[in-house]
Amino acid sequence: MATPWRSLRISVNKVFKSSPCRSSNVPRQTLPAAEVVEEECTPHYEPNHFYPVRLYEILNNRYQITAKLGWGASSTVWLARDLNQRRWCPARYVAVKIKANNYSTNKDAERELRITENITRVNSRHVGRNFVSTLLDSFNLPSPHGTHVCMVFNPLCEPLWMFRRRFQGDVLPLDVLRPVAKLILEGLGYLHSECQVVHTDLKSDNVLMALRDHSILDRVSQVK
């Protein structure tokens, strides 16, 4: 039985939490059912393996979906508002990675979660930890066709291959490349020496720039 103090604390927390956004009344463009887009283009795509996310849906009683950030053969990534943020504070956004639930991928998802948890907790004082993605939260998401492992991260900006397009000839100048390479090596040093993890897929797609202007996330949410 909940004590009076516990009930009071729960009630107060509900009052302080951010209110969910409401769905916009602006008419949305509907894609033709036969048109294949994004993760649907990947080899061996099976819709039952992916969670059917809906805009403004609230996941785990906390994260309200506001926009799609990315996709791959084994997951989709969504921008979400953290409703646990106090209502008088600026909106707090997170990136929610929702893994596919087919057998082999689900096994991989659980392994990825364990590795990410280890990376997050090993050594918070190591300088290289600042340059790898660390876990904010995780949860399991049930669907009609199985359970999906979900991981929550801080939102980041564009990948390195897209960042270089800002420069002439799609090439990073040396004065930009040197510090970027140094930070990548710091992150790899943390993974290798502290976490005993070897990154086996290091490429410009998997190196993301930090997000400096968080007001961009408000605009992204409104556009979607």
Image (cartoon, helix red, strand yellow):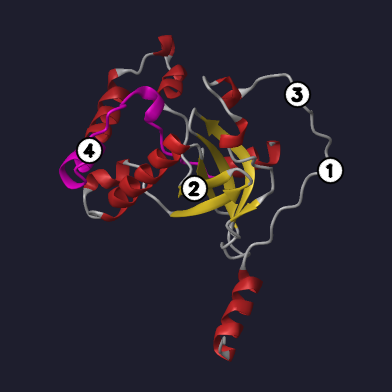
Closer to the chain start, of discs 2 and 4, is 2
Q: Residue furthest top?
A: 169
Q: CA distance from mark 3 to mark 1?
A: 22 Å
**Viewer-side residue, 187 vs 43:** 43
Residue type (three-letter) at the residue carrying disc 3: Ala
Q: What x and y, as percent, mark residue 123?
A: 22, 54
The residue that label 2 is drawn on is: 150
**Residue 215 showing in the rendered view:** no
Return the mark for residue 202: none
Q: Residue at x 44, y 24 (%)?
A: 163
Residue type (three-letter) at the residue carrying disc 2: Cys
Closer to the chain start, of discs 3 and 1, is 1
The residue that label 4 is drawn on is: 186
Residue type (three-letter) at the residue carrying disc 4: Glu
Q: Which residues are magenta?
A: 186-214
Q: CA distance from mark 3 to mark 2?
A: 27 Å
The residue that label 1 is drawn on is: 25
Q: What x and y, as percent, mark residue 67?
A: 63, 39
Q: Residues within 10 Å of mark 2 (few under 14, many from 20)?
A: many
Q: Is residue 4 left or right of residue 138?
A: right
Q: What x and y, as percent, mark residue 199?
A: 27, 32
Q: Residue furthest bottom?
A: 4
Q: Quadrant of residue 223?
A: top right
